[in-house]
Each structure stands twice: as structure tokens, then as C-alpha cells.
Image (spheres, grey):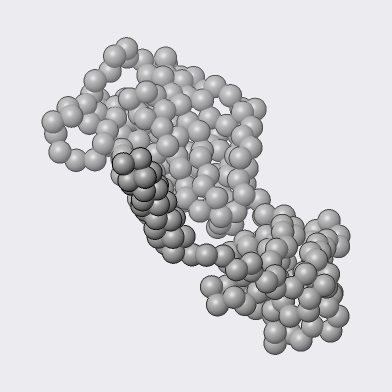
Amino acid sequence: MNIRFTLGLLENNNWSMMVPEAVDQNIGEDAIIPCSFTAPYQDYQGNITVIWRTKSQVIFRCLSKGNLSESGQNCSESTERYSLSGNPRRNNISLRIKYVSFMDRDKYFCRVELSKEGDAYETSTGTILNIRAVPQALESIYIQTLPSGEQFVACDVKGTPPPAVTWIFPENTNASLVSVQSGFDRASSSIRANLPNTNYTCQIHGENGLQYRSIYYRGVQEQQQQIPFPLFLVITILSGIFFILFVVALAMLYNKGKE
């Protein structure tokens, strides 16, 4: 997340408020819009109302009560995707927006109100939230083994939207054999690994040009025969018992020979 504080500090009658000019956030992630303030009073113990709005509507409001015994919100709850990232009692009313999308691009204004009527302050400039698309990229290629023993070659990509994956080797891969799982900004393409000693290669046309990754598939490796651990444990215990009996028998024969 990039934050630009070029507008800096706003002051009025001993009130002050620090807000950034803009916040840049990747799509699908949580955005935090900072806002901190100072009020004309020291050790203020009364109620604090926090309000966040855009140019067109109020999107979040909460009340931090000075008397903790009173029931009600204490600015710890969320409204849809909006919640406070800061603590009003520590002069921080930063806003958190979960899973931002392009529709969240707007100018945001923070406001704080105290108990006395008219005792309030808000930003006049606001903070612009810019939403950045996730760059298209090919992340990884790997061998995936299912519980059934079947093996696949999988290729993971990211981007907004996720780029289409092309398998360039083996050549002429039938599209019906390609399995694709796609999300908001990530996707995975996989094909059955049925050609031993073969280089599998996937490719995308990303924003920075052609990208590709390859992996060498040796084939299903024969597993070495191993004794199951429970059986190994039983054999070890029995061997120990037989060894002790053997030593005892030798001792008895030795003593009997001396007599």
C-alpha cells in the first residue's frame, strides 16, 4: 500500500488532523485510509463520534463512549466491509476497507465529533483511494500428486483478470484435457502427466510480454518396499525378548555346568 502525505496537516482553532492526499491499494486486498487528529482538550473522557463519508454518502459511523459501563458500540464493530483500524481514544480514526474493488475508488473524508454540540472537525480535502490492478504474471509450475496416485502438471498465475495459460509442450495439447480453476485474481491450469521423461511448459501473454515456465517430468517413481512401522516395532520388541531369553538360557546352562 502506498500513501502520499503531500497535503499534510490541517489546523483550525486548536484542532488538527493529519490525512494523506492519496492511498494506492491492490485490488482484492484490504485498504487502510489513515486519519489522526488532536482536539482542543487534554485527557478528554467524553463520547467520541467517528464518521467517514465519500463525496456522496456516509459509509461508516461509530460511537466511542466515555463511560465504559454504558452499553452500545465502542467503535470496535464493522459495518459491511468498513471498520476502524485505529483507536479514537488514541486520536486515530483510520478506516479499513476489506477486499477493495474498482468500485471503491473515491475520495474519503474523516470527521470526529465530541459531546458538545458543534465541537467537531473534519477534513476538507479528503483522501483519494486509488485501486491498482494486480499485474499479470506466471508464478509457478509444479507436479501435483492426488491421493489416488494420479499425477498432474499444474501452472499457477495471478493478475486482474488472471491471464489465460497455454501449454506449449507437449505440443497440440487437447483443450478438453486441461483443467482450469480460476478466482478473482488467481488461477491454476493443470494437465495430466502421462509422458515420462518430458519437459512440460506453460506460457502466458502478460503485461510485460511473453512469460513461460518449464518442469521436467520423470514419471511415476517406484516406491521402495518398506516395512510398515507397526510391524517394524513388533519385530523389534520380539527380537529383544528373544535376545533376553537367549542370554538367560546361556546363563542357566553355564551355572548348571559349574555344578
Q: Is residue 251 visible?
A: no
Q: Quadrant of the C terminus?
A: top left
The location of residue 91, given as percent across then percent down, is 39, 24
Q: Is residue 45 visible?
A: yes
The quarter of the picture where residue 72 lies is: top left
- Closer to us: 251 or 114: 251
Q: Quadrant of the N terminus?
A: top right
For residue 199, side relative to residue 136 (left or right): right
* Residue placed furthest toward the top: 42
For the point 44% across and 64% down, which residue is it?
231
For residue 116, side relative to residue 185 (left or right): left
The quarter of the picture where residue 213 lies is: bottom right
The location of residue 14, given as percent across then percent down, is 42, 14
- Closer to us: 201 or 139: 201
The location of residue 57, given as percent across then percent down, is 43, 50
For the point 62% across and 77% down, which residue is it?
150
- Closer to us: 227 or 159: 227
Examine the rendered structure and indicate whether residue 93 appears above or below residue 97: above
Examine the rendered structure and indicate whether residue 90 appears above or below residue 176: above
Examine the rendered structure and indicate whether residue 52 appears above or below residue 217: above
